[in-house]
C-alpha cells in the first residue's frame, strides 16, 4: 500500500527500493591521500508496479491523472523497513499497457512508475560531518582575521609566529 497526496492506494503491487548516498562535487582524493566525502544525503528511489489490473476504471484513471499532474512534487507515503517513509518527490517513467480481451472488454494494465525524491531523506548534521574522521574545529570565540591555528596532540594551538604579509618588505 502507498499514498499519494493523501490518497491511499491499497492495491497489490511490487515495490523496489534503492538507496543512494550522494556526494557533492568537492568530494575526492585529498593531498594527504585520504578520501574526502562531502555527503549531501541519502536519497531513496522507489519503483512501483501494479500486479493486478484495477477493475475500477475510474480509480485507475484517477491514479494516472494524479501521477501525471504537472507539479514539482507529490507527497508520498511508502513502505520503509517496519514503518513508512514520507517523502516529497516526482513520479517519472510512468508506463502502462492497453489491453483488449476477446470479449471486446478493454482496459489499461501493467502500470509502473518511479518515485524520485526532491530532497534527501537522511542528512548529516554539521557535528556529524566534523567528527567523522575530520579534525574538530577550534573552540575559539575571539579569533580575528589572520589568526592561524595548528592541530596537535594537545589540541588546537594558536600559531602566532607568522608575520603579516601586508607589512613585509621585500
Image (cartoon, helix red, strand yellow):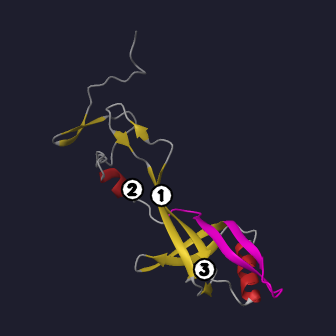
User: Quadrant location of the C terminus?
Assistant: top left
Residue situated in front as seen by the camera: 141 or 54: 54
Specify the label residue 126 is tagged with.
2
- Magenta highlight range: 93-120
* Residue at figure coordinates x 47%, y 41% from the top left: 26
Report the Cα–Cα distance between label 3 and label 2. Answer: 43 Å
**Is 115 one of the magenta-colored residues?**
yes
- Give the foreground label among 3 and 2: 3
Query: Which quadrant holds residue 89?
Result: bottom right
* Residue at figure coordinates x 39%, y 60% from the top left: 125
Q: Pointer 3: residues within 10 angstroms few (<14), some, or many (20+)?
A: some
- Give the foreground label among 3 and 1: 3
Q: Residue furthest front?
A: 102
Dot 2: element: helix
Query: Which quadrant holds residue 152?
Result: top left
Q: Which residue lies furthest to the right in this view?
A: 104
Dot 3: element: loop
Please tell me which of labels 3 and 2 falls first in the chain.
3
**In the displayed structure, does residue 55 sit left or right of residue 11?**
right
Magenta stretch, main secondary structure, is strand
**Position of 101 relative to 141 (above/below):** below
Q: Mark 1 points at which residue?
A: 20
Report the Cα–Cα distance between label 3 and label 1. Answer: 26 Å
Whether residue 41 appears in this view of the structure is: no
Amino acid at each position: 500500500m502507498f499514498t499519494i497526496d493523501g490518497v491511499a492506494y491499497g492495491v497489490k503491487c511490487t515495490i523496489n527500493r534503492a538507496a543512494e548516498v550522494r556526494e557533492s562535487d568537492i568530494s575526492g582524493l585529498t593531498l594527504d591521500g585520504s578520501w574526502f566525502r562531502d555527503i549531501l544525503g541519502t536519497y531513496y528511489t522507489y519503483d512501483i508496479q501494479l500486479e493486478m489490473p484495477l477493475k475500477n476504471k475510474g480509480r485507475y484513471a484517477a491514479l494516472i491523472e494524479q501521477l501525471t499532474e504537472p507539479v514539482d512534487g507529490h507527497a508520498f507515503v511508502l513502505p520503509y523497513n517496519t514503518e513508512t517513509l514520507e517523502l516529497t518527490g516526482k513520479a517519472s517513467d510512468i508506463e502502462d499497457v492497453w489491453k483488449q480481451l476477446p470479449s471486446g472488454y478493454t482496459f489499461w494494465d501493467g502500470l509502473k512508475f518511479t518515485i524520485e525524491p526532491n530532497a534527501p531523506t537522511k542528512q548529516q548534521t554539521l557535528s556529524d560531518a566534523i567528527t567523522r574522521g575530520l579534525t574538530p574545529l577550534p573552540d575559539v570565540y575571539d579569533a580575528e582575521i589572520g589568526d592561524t591555528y595548528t592541530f596537535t596532540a594537545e589540541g588546537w594551538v594558536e600559531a602566532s609566529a607568522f608575520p603579516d604579509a601586508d607589512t613585509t618588505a621585500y
